[in-house]
Amino acid sequence: MKTASKPLHRGRAEAEPAWRKEFEAILEAYGRAGGDPAALKMPNVATLVVSSNRVLVANEIPGVRFEAEELPHGVRARILVAPDAHIDKTVHLCFGMLPAEGEQEIIAEYDIGSGAQVEFLAHCTFPNAIHLKHMMDARIHVGTGARMIYRESHYHGTEGGIEVLPKAKVTIDEGGSIVTTFSLVHGRVGKLDIDYDVAAAKGSVAELTTKAYGQSDDVVRVSETLHLNGEGARGLTKTRIAVRDRAISEVFTTAEGNAPFARGHMDCTEVIRGGATARNVPVVLVRDDRAHVTHEAAIGTVNHKELETLMARGLDEEEAVDIIIRGILQE
Amino acid sequence: MKEDSYLLSVENLGLKRSSRDILTHVNLHLRPGEVHGLLGLNGSGKSSLAYALMGSAGYEPDEGVIEFAGRDITHLSITERARLGLTLAWQEPARFEGLPVGAYLALGAKDQNRESVAAALEAVALAPAAYMKRPLNHTLSGGERKRIELAAVFAMGARMVILDEPDSGVDMLTLRDVAALIKSMAAQGRSVLLITHRDEMITAADSASLMCRGTIVFRGGPDEVRQYYDKRCRMHGGALGAQPWQRDSAGWSIPT
């Protein structure tokens, strides 16, 4: 089934009680994931809501178009922002699954037209996950001089029985920019395997930020590559991960300086507690003697002085550790 | 010396690190509402005593007893001590990435409402509107963080506050501001252990001690201690690590 150019939620609620029930449930989960459910009902806000393999809402506004197709285990979606469109209100995306078990595959294509400016807020919510797999395979094209901000926040429930595989291949044309933030700091992570690959043309900018908080036997794996191919292209990967108990964090980042005056930096902080394990493997690859690529990494436990300061205010050690870690992940 | 009326009673406290004496035979007593100034040159053991009193890791005493509010707290955790009403404002305050000033102050505050947090900021001459939402990180100057640290212990309403060099390393925080805050806490019936190496600071205290080589070598009224310090100690203040007192059979003295 293909849907496009129609606000699916309007007028459907009364006619389709099953749709309404699912929409309300996903709204509730969206709220628990930190989203604002009211935003998903506003007619002047571009909104795409996907539950399992059903497109519940595809609300378009001038300048933003959705083409969505339901697949057996997910959805294929094209998200198109018209050239030179400046979208004032954040575009809301909601991908979720309410069942405890199953599989969801989102094949997404973002095309941000030249000179356009748009901000996306995506919430991925799997509140009841016990044995669930979520795959996101995205291709993102940021046109010449366009600016895209993409913030993605996940909520996976408390069981940890979920596998999340976000994969994105990003191309940025001359003078374009993309700023992404992936955040999974509430509830359990389960198994997370991020794989982002960015090719940046002349004068373009890419900033990738990843934040995750792994507990119990969670596994966090982040793989990010910046190909700074154009003259003066700039790229930053910023990774903030905390792991405790028996959780594992592995961060692999690569920054390639392939053109004159390309500037790349990889900044990784991992906090470990208890029997957790953290690893950071940065790769610096420079193919032009006028390019400059740097990295910094810090792995260790929470700062001793911060911990004792909070304890001296009456917090117990666990409370203090949690506040310090959440502060690091929030920044 | 032991009296039921003491809020803090430190008896014969000793601390070694790497076989080196850091604190030896420290005796110290504070009554409720008393402000006691602890004066000493850099390296005399003042901060080590503060950490030992607060229960910091690595500062567990090898001998002696610390009693607070009638309880032996020598082996209690920092949290347990704090919950009994003892707290410490560190000489070099911690930074907290991502934690706003208002949230930090509210964490330990006796009353966690916005008004009491704002009142604590005003007590250290910081405008609440300008600081409540600012992150407590590198974007704040050393002086601002110092004031916020003082605001935190003020907001906490602890029965006893240890202020470790509240006047050091800051350009904006005036002695008058610190003295006013100390008086305000004392007026609320709280005890203050004011640690400093600036003798003019202890005029804000009710009583004072002079520390050298990890022990208390002289005690008395603030003026007495200040005069003693002025005559016998000030000339050594320029040399970092200088600890002029020596102990012999007659007690502590500075060799001529």
Image (cartoon, rainbow, N blue to C red):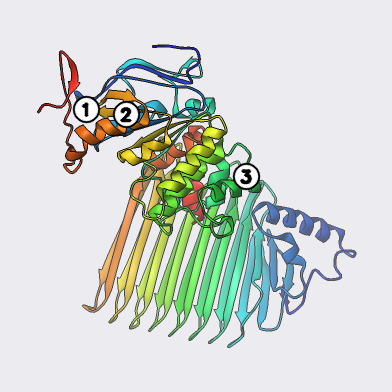
Residue under the image location 11 percent in, 26 percent down? B255
Foreground: B116 or B123?
Answer: B123
- Horizontal placement of B63 versus A324: left or right? left
Number of the label disc, if any, that sits on residue B224? 2
Residue denoted by label 3: B116
- Residue B238 in percent (x, y) is at 18, 44
For the residues carrying marks 2 and 3, which lies nearer the camera in this image? 2
- Residue A60 in percent (x, y) is at 72, 77
Q: Is residue A95 above or below residue A83?
A: above
- How far apart are the two marked residues, 1 and 3, measured between alpha carbons? 41 Å
In the rendered structure, are the residues bearing label 2 and label 3 in contact, judged by CB atoms less than 8 Å apart?
no
| Rendering quarter of residue A97 | bottom right
Does residue A309 appear in the picture of this structure? yes
Residue denoted by label 1: B213
Q: Is residue A284 above or below residue A141?
A: above
Residue under the image location 50 percent in, 50 percent down? A327
Q: Chain of mark 1?
A: B
Other-residue count near label 2 (Cα within 10 Å), few / some / many at <14 / 14–19 / ≥20:
some
Which amino acid lies under the numbered mark 1 shown in the image of this protein?
Arg
For marks 2 and 1 on the same chain, the one whose residue lies earlier in the sequence? 1
Q: Are both tags, 2 and 3, on one chain?
A: yes
- Horizontal placement of B240 versus B136: left or right? left
Secondary structure under tag 1 reads loop
In the rendered structure, are the residues bearing label 2 and label 1 in contact, judged by CB atoms less than 8 Å apart?
no
| Rendering quarter of residue B179 | top left
Number of the label disc, if any, that sits on residue A135? none
- How far apart are the two marked residues, 2 and 1, measured between alpha carbons? 20 Å
Which amino acid lies under the numbered mark 3 shown in the image of this protein?
Ser
Quadrant holding the N terminus of chain A? bottom right
For marks 2 and 3 on the same chain, the one whose residue lies earlier in the sequence? 3
